[in-house]
Image: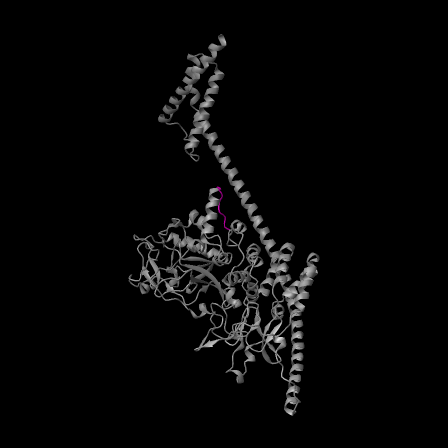
Amino acid sequence: MSESPPKKTLTDLGGPRLYGDEPDKTEEAQGTFETLDECTYTPKSLGASKHNEFMECDCYEEIIDGTNHACGENSDCINRLTLIECVNGLCGSCGDNCGNQRFQRKEYAEIAVFRTEMKGYGVRAEKDIDENQFVYEYKGEVIAENEFRRRLADYDEKGLKHFYFMMLQNSEFIDATRKGSLARFCNHSCNPNAYVSKWVVAGKLRMGIFAKRKIEKGEEITFDYNVDRYGATAQKCYCGEPNCIGFLGGKTQTDAASLLPQNIADALGVRTAMEKKWIKWKKSQGEKIKKAEDNNYNIEFVESLNPEPCKKPDDVTKVMSALLQAEDSLIALKLFGRIEKLEDETLYHHVIKLHGYTCFTKLLKIFENDIETENRLLDVLLSLPKTTKNGIVNSQIDVAVMHLKEISKPLSESCDLLISKWNEFETYKRITKRDISEASKKMVDFRRIRLPVGWEVVHENGKPMYYNAQLKTKLHHPPSGSSKTFSSNGLQTNGNGKLIDQRNAIIPKRMRLDDDEYEKMKLRRLEKENDMIQRAKEEEIKQMKLKLDMENRKKNDLLEIIAEANRNRELEREENLKLERIKEEQRLQKKKLSHSMHLEHKWNKFFASFVPNLLRNYERDNQIPHEHIKQCAKDIVKILTSKELKKDKTKVPPDQPSKEKKTKVKQFAKSYMEKFLQKYKQKKALTKK
């Protein structure tokens, strides 16, 4: 399914080859398989996400021209960052039909199937496709590994040329051979313009094809089969790229397989050239390139990496997205290193914005009992800039640090410093959807105002405020605009760039209170009291939540103990099976050896039945002692037996030697005895001297 056209794949100017003039074969191609509206899971338990857990995002509904733009490409939606689609009814604030539902709404790029020169059908873009745009979902029948092995053998036996298997997760595969979508016709390239990514949609894993770079109209859409596609045997690759490895499957494929999943490679700043250089170095050392199946990455390669710190917000976004999904400690440690070495302090605000405290809560759990790494995590937490306390409470990072203090005495001092620092942070009610009343719909939606680094919108005494925890500054108006700007340190300036001292602002002279002003003052006092009551309720809810979380933690611990016991039983079962296999191999080896010895004995007996008679003349004519002749006969029999077994280890000697066989043996015996006589006479002559 991979092509090397007669013409060059790229023009001399480096542009892609376009296939827009090729006839559209989409309808014809659809007749070769059954089109699925959704993947089918057989059984239904397959495809369940084992790691990525759905979290209600905190994005805000943003309706423009009847379309909800919440959770879009450039948002900090926690579900989008962790490759999970939002689901109507489960996410509250972002609203229904947000921008993070591409699989559910089938937001496919415009594509068409065409006939290639050497690889059957291919897929081309009917319009330009932007970088990272969703192209198509790879659909099929989701099957378990035993069924995958059975079908693989069945398709091979039936002589099918092309296989459409793709690994969904460990021991689970998508088979698009008979049922699937147009994505099955996307061909392989060693220099692809698209990549495959796994997303969780309503609790099920789905496989999508996304643009790796901008794809021009008429350009063929390709991705790398080496990691995700499976066939019966190695096939020749015809992609025609300068870096083409020649084959799909087999040893070549293993050597060239991606060392890291695409999203992890991007987050660690790993480029293709770095992977190739490492592979070349390993081969020069005469070492094999191993790829861990469970982790889906090369451990040796990852250990060799020393990632640079994040330089820009886009780097932080990629790292935080990967960290929120990370389950493996080695990957998590390498990703954390890029955050730990940040040189631009403003990027720490970006870390916090992208659910940084939630991420650190997860990291403390991953590196539990790893004191060195836990200490590094605490150091970074201590260096994070001041914000409101809301993110700390919502992420429960404070609970995790208190737990760490209880179980690790060496880290108790750092934990105390961190808790003490957080206790100074202020807690505010954030602006929510409910805060936008019917009367204020025509006013500014404070949640959508883009603020300078370090500023956020909070709710105080029933009114929106702009708060900078680092500067301990509150404003009634946004810290931006034509009439006022902000200096690099975040302080307010007038239009000429002169600082405005908020503390020395002119305060109008207090006037005598009339009845209306008195009523307003009473109303403000009541609002303040209501706010205190609300805070007390929130604190009560927080305590109840902590209690519930403790119970859930105990439940999870129990489940982990049960899971560990099951894993131990499985390991024991595998060990027993291994021992049984070893015993069976030893038994077969012993049987094979016994059979070999039995055949050797039969051939010895066969040749011994007539070889001694062939040597009698030598004893009489040359006056050679009988013992020497007897030994010669034994040696000849042994040599002849060895030759027969070397030719065929399973052949059984005949009951009687044929005339032809006797002649050959006689010739061999004559040659052997002539050499023996020569040596015997030489030895006898030396003895007489």
Q: How many discs mark residues in the rendered view?
A: 0
Provide residue 376's location: percent of width, then percent of height.
62, 57
Q: Residue at x 46, y 44 (%)?
A: 283
Residue 192 shows in the view: yes
Q: Inspect the magenta stretch and tell me whether residue 288 lies in it.
A: yes
Dominant secondary structure (helix, strand or loop) of the stretch shown in magenta: loop
Judge by depth and name the residue closer to the eye, 351 or 262: 351
Q: Quadrant of residue 411?
A: bottom right
Outermost residue, top side = 689
Q: Is residue 156 above or below residue 623?
A: below
Task: Indicate the position of residue 224 as horizontal and vertical percent values.
Answer: 42, 55
Q: Is residue 589 left or right of residue 648?
A: right
Quarter in which the N terminus is drawn: bottom left
**Which sits in the foreground, 669 or 29?**
29
Residue 261 screen position, x and y as percent: 48, 56
Tell me the magenta residue range. 285-291
